[in-house]
Amino acid sequence: MMKPVFPLVLLFLFSTLALAQDFHVRVWPGLAPNETESVEKIKATRDVTCPMLDVFLPEKTKANGKCLLIFPGGGYAFLSVYPGAFYYTAEYFRERGYVCAVLQYRVPVRKWAGEERHKAAWQDAQRAIRLVRSKASEWGFDPEKIGAMGGSAGGHLTVFCAVNSQHRAYDPIDEIDQIPCHLNFAAPLYPAYLVPAEKYSCGSKSNEMALADNLYFDEKTPPFCIFFGDEDTTCTPTGALALYRQLRLMNIPAELHIYAKTRHTFVGDYKSEHKGSWLKSMYDWIELMVK
């Protein structure tokens, strides 16, 4: 006699629910800067007017006091939030005791931003860092153990927040904006727009080692772990080299992984014995650097 499958279905459903984010948080209390509407969308990929954080809390018995913000990529034109990439990353770190928050920032590029295609996303990211820092006690982590990771445009946003925390992206609107927005560690994957030839668009094959002139390193710039593929034709790998060089010149701890025969957007590759090691390497580095 065939056994009923109903308990198995329930088990599958509960397992699926366990992988879902715990809750959503609006980044802004009202309209985001320069916006005229604010429409909440869950896991939106395009036309985002209401920035949101998808928050993942670890089991209390596993909590390690660290928080990881995750910035999806998409060239600031859309959000690449497919489950096999950035949400899997959130689950991976949540299972290891981290509070994780995936930022759904505004896309596409706003006309008012001009050549600063990252401006709206940077405003959202700065506000998100301040917001999660304000929630440190409530969510159960150390407010000085906040880091960020992201790929491509999300990698650029990670870098931009890490090196420009002393520059305000928007005018303060409430008490949360009095909270510092620095990061304590940063782990960008194949970050875009780092070199002058890519400052406003990708696709550069430049081998220049200079960094874009809108990156301001200072005393709040945190340790970095950088990941890139040497066959990346979307963004030049020399951007990662230039970033690493600048960090070393300033005696800021930095680790650099450049994978051979690897192209852009390998964030969703966890099975390759080669580039698929990036996720564990990132975790090991954070554990080493953030005690």
Image (cartoon, helix red, strand yellow):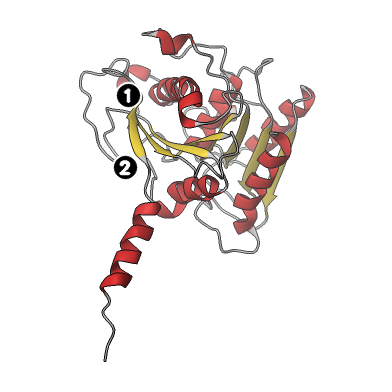
x, y percent for residue 9: 29, 69
Q: Earlier in the sequence, mark 2 or mark 1?
A: 2
x, y percent for residue 8: 32, 71
Residue labelled with disc 2:
43
Name above or below for residue 92 compared with residue 31: below
* Whole-number angstrom distance, CA of label 2 to CA of label 1: 20 Å
Disc 1 secondary structure class: loop
Q: Is residue 270 left or right of residue 32?
A: right
Name above or below for residue 98 compared with residue 232: above
Pick whichever, 59 or 176, lies toward us: 59
Which residue is found at the position 26% from the left and 92% from the top? 1
Which residue is found at the position 38% from the left and 59% from the top? 15
x, y percent for residue 243: 67, 31
Pick whichever, 149 or 155, lies toward us: 149
Going by the numbered disc 1, the residue's amino acid type is Arg
Quarter-of-image position of residue 142 = top right
Q: Is residue 238 visible?
A: no
Which residue is found at the position 50% from the left and 24% from the top? 137
Residue lying furthest bottom in this view?
A: 1
Going by the numbered disc 2, the residue's amino acid type is Lys
Q: Is residue 11 left or right of residue 140?
A: left
Residue labelled with disc 1:
110
Quarter-of-image position of residue 240 = top right
x, y percent for residue 56: 43, 41
Q: Is residue 31 visible?
A: yes
Mark 2 crowd level (few <14, some 14–19, many ≥20, 10 Å Cα)? some
Which residue is found at the position 39% from the left and 45% from the top? 80
Q: Quadrant of the C terminus?
A: top right
Pick whichever, 23 or 39, lies toward us: 23
